[in-house]
Amino acid sequence: MPVETQTLGENWLVVGLMLVSAFSMGMLLLTLNKIMAPSKPSAAKAAPYESGMPDIEPVRPSYSPRFYVVAMLFVIFDIEAIFIFPWAVIFDELGTYGFVEMVSFIGLLFVGYIYAWKKGALEWV
Amino acid sequence: MPWDVLIFYLIAAVCVLSAAGVVVARNPVHSAIFLVLCFVNIAATFVMMGAEFLAVVQVIVYTGAILVLVLFVLMLVNPDDLPEFHAARPVQRYVGLLLGAILLLEVGAAIVTRSVSGEQGTATPDNIAAVGGNTQALGRVLYSDYLLAFEVVSLVLLVGVVGAIVLALPERLGERPSVARRGSISLSHPRGVDAALPEGRPAGETLIPTRHSTSPTRASGAVATGNDREVSAGPTPTGVVRDLVMTRDADAFGHMGDKR
């Protein structure tokens, strides 16, 4: 595979264009919404419940700490995925040796995954 | 001025300003969004230095995962309960200022003297380009020379999984939160069960005895024990006191129909 030395401009111009277009698209839609949509806010519209009893206290939903556990597990398995990227791009060079390395790496984390599963950390309710 | 220098200054300026925004913003959610902007710009500076893999890791791990954690904390914790900066103890402020000054001195010294200690390694830009890029170069080293460290990372992550579950999982295996298990019923929560109040209650809440509170014998019994709660008549296997928690006076309910 020939190695090309690409300059910053060639390589990342596309990424930059994508970022700029995504940002400007979001800004455009929000601005259009601001200009064109009728906006007549009132206290009643801002209330959490349209009708029924007046609020006894500020209504704020309580979230289960389980969501946080899921988020923490996400971080850990995210990092696992990060380690797979450099392994994948040189998989051909590493051969069987690299395969065994990665199987033991993922295998250990699979134990953690089974543990999380059995403990019910992945259940939503 | 060449283009890449101009772009660098733009990125660095946005980065510094958004980092300042993290500290200055009053709303914690705004701080988190500023932090996203700061992390993305740091990733952009990594790209400009030719460290593409690091840039992608920065975006995936910090912007993608860590910021999600921060936002989850903000979602779980009521932002009104977060202490203001000025409410922090003086010791914390002085230590923070001291550490910040030390960090500023370190960075300033490195910039002024333009010297970083240590020898230059073999991972020069030319060597990296010769093997095809950052990711390839990192993979070659990581999966041969630093194999042990790589496998230890797996163990560390495993410990992280176990620790997260042991420390943060609210209920033990198989148990569901139930009214009988919790000590109180709260009107302030949608499902009627206030999991956040196992023992103490925040100020401003008044306990309303659930039954027979006007009965003289019961009332005197409650006074005698110095307890304004009523033990429910139903069988509570764990002996948990069950009562109704309201966040304002009971009178508030009586007037409700009249006022609006």
Image (cartoon, coloured by chain):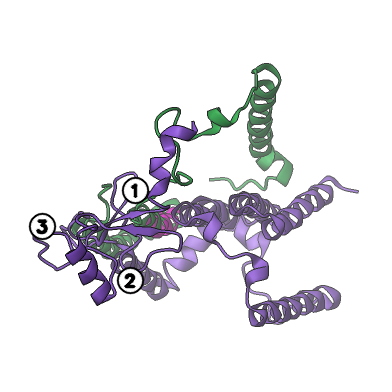
Chain colours: A green, B purple
**Residue B184 lies in quadrant:** bottom left
- The span from disc 1 to disc 2 (Cα, nearest Å) is 39 Å
Q: Nearer the N terminus, badge 1 or badge 2?
A: 2
Q: In percent of the image, x 47 and y 51: which residue is there? A: B75
* Residue to which mark 2 is pinned: B159
Residue type, mark 2 in image: Val
The residue range painted magenta reads A75-85
The kind of secondary structure element at disc 2 is helix
Q: Chain of mark 3?
A: B
Are the residues under marks 1 and 3 on the same chain? yes
Residue B26 % position (x, y): 67, 55
Vertical arrangement, residue B117 with respect to residue B11, above or below: below
Q: Nearer the viewer, residue B23 or B197?
A: B197
Is B168 on the left or on the right of B68, as rendered? Answer: left
Are the residues under marks 1 and 2 on the same chain? yes
- The span from disc 2 to disc 3 (Cα, nearest Å) is 43 Å
* Residue to which mark 1 is pinned: B187
In this view, which residue lies farthest toward the right? B1
- The span from disc 1 to disc 3 (Cα, nearest Å) is 20 Å
Q: In percent of the image, x 64 and y 18: which residue is there? A: A37
Q: Nearer the viewer, residue A9 or B19?
A: B19
Residue B23 % position (x, y): 69, 61
